[in-house]
Image: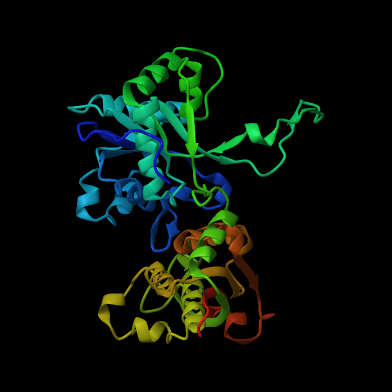
Amino acid sequence: MMSPFLTVPDRITVAALIVAAGRGLRVGLDRPKQYLDLYGETVLTRSIRALAADKRVRSIICVIHPDDRPLYDAAIAQLDGDIAALLVEPAYGGATRQASGRAGLEALSNVTRPPDIVLVHDAARPFTSPALVRRSIEAAYAKGAAIPGIPVTDTIKRVDTQGQITDTPARRDLKAVQTPQAFRFDLLLNAHRAAAKEKGEEFTDDAAIAEWAGHPVHVFDGEIENTKLTTSADFVAARERRMGPSETRTGIGYDVHAFAEGNHVILGGVAIPHSHRLSGHSDADVVLHALTDAIFGALADGDIGSHFPPSDPQWKGADSRIFLEYAIERVKARRGRVVHLDTTIICEMPKIGPHRDAIRERIAFICGISVDRVGVKATTTEQLGFTGRKEGIAAQALATLSLPAED
């Protein structure tokens, strides 16, 4: 279908503003969702690529949280040079979505030539198509303020504070709105500046600010596929959609290390005070070693010794996180994902209970999965065997993976 909007002249400059300052707490990980992996790159870099696909986008600014600069730098390092060249220095977001949007606009206003059109996009919408970006630019040029929307399929009820229905709007009058929202740059910047002086309600999107400032906002066709990743279930659905038919694989891992003189042990990437340390060629983290072997087992991809031979001096004293991260990369290379990890730590001392949550969180962070997909348990051998004699620690692990189904 032909575009209902005017052809945008080449002299019109377009910038993309990607809001990526949120914390993404509903996903359940200890890093914001825009920095999680999706098909081998972060959600943020996929969103950047989506907007950069239209050659009329001459610059891209990301609004990030000040604490996330290292994550941002690592993410954009994945980008090709021609796309990376579009990026300007990121702006730092504020306490609200409104404040973050304004921070990005003010930063764009200070460049040598501010853009004519700005596209404001949520970093958590990585599936935006080139056609939707094109429609956004054309709509902003033709209307001044425009947003993509899709029909609402559910019946919507308006309710009061007591939970009683007060109104049932007609579905034909409703749209579920998306991003990128598109505006004439000066229109949106001035609206934001005016709204910032008010002490009233905070606005949750830029269209609402433009409306408040008295500008009519046009709605054009969005895309059902342009979904927003909000919860861990959204990520699972997105990955499964990409993978197609899948199969479940399981692998078992086991590791043992003896005690030596020291003052702490490292278990699951967490340093725990103890009267001894664990002896080994690396840092002797039996938990991460067992988990790594469990993943290799599910992949039918050898074991930790075949990938990281103890005879190789480069692994002497190595952080075992390296081994587990490598195993996770092997999963990603097969277009798979980790469904669940479970480990049992076998020892008399130290007590694992006080450190269980920290271990789970550390494993989840290393593997890029939610904490509710990591199980950590501890047991003793009732003073039997080498662990019962307090000569060392053992760990068992089980990894459950989802991989593309083989013919």
Q: Residue at x 42, y 77 (%)?
A: 279
Viewer-proximal residue, 132 or 124?
Answer: 132
In this view, 206 is above or below 193: below
Q: Position of residue 301 (x, y in %)?
A: 43, 85
Left or right, 112 with respect to 355, comes to left
Viewer-proximal residue, 63 or 69?
Answer: 63
Q: Position of residue 236 (x, y in %)?
A: 56, 61
- Give the number of callouts: 0
Left or right, 372 with respect to 77, comes to right
Left or right, 61 with respect to 101, comes to left
**Does residue 18 appear in the picture of this structure?**
no
Viewer-proximal residue, 312 or 141?
Answer: 141
Q: Residue at x 52, y 13 (%)?
A: 199
User: Which quadrant holds residue 142?
Assistant: top left
- Pick out the residue farthest to the front: 2
Viewer-proximal residue, 277 or 31?
Answer: 31
User: Which quadrant holds residue 108?
Assistant: top left
In this view, 211 is above or below 356: above
Q: Residue at x 60, y 71 (%)?
A: 342
Colour pattern: rainbow
In this view, 374 is above or below 76: below
**Does residue 99 appear in the picture of this structure?**
yes
